[in-house]
Amino acid sequence: DLNELKTTGAKVKVRKDLALQQVAALSNKANSEGQLEDAKPKLDLSLQGQWNGRDEEYSKAYDESFEKDQPLWYVGVSFSMPLDQFKYSDAREGYRKMAQAYELRRDSLKEEALNTWRNFIDQGSLLKDQIQLSRDLEDVQKKKADSERQRLQRGRSTTFQVLSFEQDYIAAKSQRINTELKAREYLTLKPMFE
């Protein structure tokens, strides 16, 4: 049925395998950006507070620890940086380039998916036209062969001419069958885009 080949107006769909590769590229990009952040120097600030009891006896000191008379505060700053800064700057540059590479890969996969979909749509339109043409050609060749058989019965043609026209008809029929087989193969690819 030629209506199965109709794909005009269909929105762009992405093959499942390409969609998975796009997700993997996005994940790899995020991973390399995380590694880039890990290779940078770090500055941490911390603040801590607690209440303390200052009595010699435990029970009194314990009771005093719930009061706000004697607070104890800690403020901390921590800076960490790799000692071999040149090595880590090269690593950071590598992570940056990896992130760019994954982004380019993702863009290329998007483009490939779009091109694959366009080719799929174009192939469907082409097959639809080819099937219609091969059916028309088969009908014309059949009429031509039938007409030549009638002419042979009236003595106005030769057997060779009839056989020649029948061969043309058989070739046209074979071409139609091959085109319909190609269309069936095409339709088996359709679920990849759903």
Image: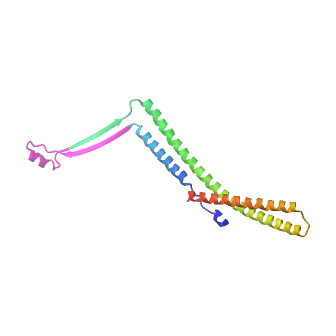
Residue at 73% over, 59% down: 174
Q: Which sits in the foreground, 7 or 11?
A: 7
Where residue 185 appears, as percent x and y from the top left, is 63, 57
Q: Quadrant of residue 54?
A: top left
Which quarter of the image is occupied by the N terminus? bottom right
Residue at 69% over, 62% down: 128
Q: Which sits in the foreground, 183 or 16?
A: 183
Q: Which residues are magenta?
A: 42-71
Residue at 52% over, 44% down: 102
Q: Quick check: 100 left or right of 184? A: left
Where residue 18 appears, as percent x and y from the top left, is 55, 51
Q: Quick check: 87 left or right of 170? A: left
Q: Is residue 62 magenta?
A: yes
Q: Quadrant of residue 38?
A: top left
Q: Quick check: 159 left or right of 82? A: right
Q: Which sits in the foreground, 85 or 69?
A: 85
Q: How many marks?
A: 0
Q: Quick check: 146 left or right of 10? A: right
Which quarter of the image is occupied by the C terminus? bottom right
Where residue 171 appears, as percent x and y from the top left, is 77, 59
Where residue 64 appears, as percent x and y from the top left, is 13, 48
Q: Is residue 72 magenta?
A: no
| Colouring used for the render | rainbow
Residue at 77% over, 61% down: 170
Question: In the orientation shown, which residue stands out farthest toward the right?
Answer: 156
Q: Which sits in the foreground, 159 or 99?
A: 159
